[in-house]
Image: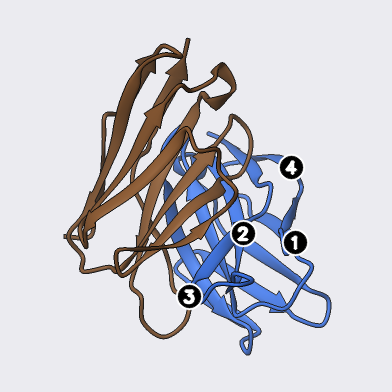
Chain colours: A blue, B brown
Amino acid sequence: SQQGEEDPQALSIQEGENATMNCSYKTSINNLQWYRQNSGRGLVHLILIRSNEREKHSGRLRVTLDTSKKSSSLLITASRAADTASYFCATAGKHSGAGSYQLTFGKGTKLSVIP
Amino acid sequence: DTEVTQTPKHLVMGMTNKKSLKCEQHMGHRAMYWYKQKAKKPPELMFVYSYEKLSINESVPSRFSPECPNSSLLNLHLHALQPEDSALYLCASRYEGQGPGEQYFGPGTRLTVT
């Protein structure tokens, strides 16, 4: 299994602070993606980082990838109450025995941003 | 249009019922997915369709039967479900191009089996 494992499982911060979430995975990947999920709703894609990239930025998001350690981190700067959600990393790789790619999701970090 | 729609939003069914979940996208994506998500857990892949053909079936019980009638539609037919099948069922789609890009998710169907 190449399931990602996030830590922490839950994170509570004050509005304006930065939030850092980490993800570790087990096997080689094509890319690693981060998704956000508001309570009981669908997932929203945040950012994708390819296996040959080390860092990527998108607005207030910064993602790093260390393939030697099989780990990634997501940093949300200047957090807002609206950032309250669960955040999942997902590793992308080819499904064994099939030509299609699949995502394998980590357990997720539940972020609470207190106004 | 960058939206994946799912109907119904909520579904309550008995263990002897037959029902269907529907997913639709008009982004020209040729890969479509069904996921099951239990409370406080990550989504778990159930099925993958690529160019309207079933590509991956993650050993899902036969009481779940997927169907992809055309490139925009994905159905999940449900029959004789168990209470433990209660979950959020998510549909997603992806551009089937070069390599695994982002997936676009629908809002999900909250299924309760009584």
Disc 4 from disc 1: Cα separation? 20 Å
Which residue is rendered at x = 26% and y = 29% of the image? B8
The amino acid on which the numbered mark 4 sits, given as a three-letter code, is: Gln
Disc 3 from disc 4: Cα separation? 26 Å
Q: Are marks 1 and 2 in contact (CB under 8 Å)?
A: yes
Residue B55 percent across, percent down from the top left = 45, 65
Q: Are marks 4 and 2 in contact (CB under 8 Å)?
A: no
Above or below for A105 versus B38: below
Disc 4 from disc 2: Cα separation? 17 Å
Task: Answer left or right for B10 relative to A57.
Answer: left
The amino acid on which the numbered mark 1 sits, given as a three-letter code, is: Ser
Task: Answer left or right for A90 relative to B3.
Answer: right
Residue A115 appears in the rendering: yes
Disc 1 from disc 2: Cα separation? 8 Å
- Sequence-wise, which precedes: disc 1 or disc 2? 1
Same chain assignment for discs 3 and 1: no
Check residue A1 in the rendering and tell me which mark sits there, or answer none: 1
The amino acid on which the numbered mark 2 sits, given as a three-letter code, is: Thr
Q: Which residue is mark 4?
A: A9
Q: Which residue is mark 3?
A: B100
Residue A16 appears in the rendering: no
Same chain assignment for discs 4 and 2: yes
Which residue is rendered at x = 72% and y = 64% of the image? A2
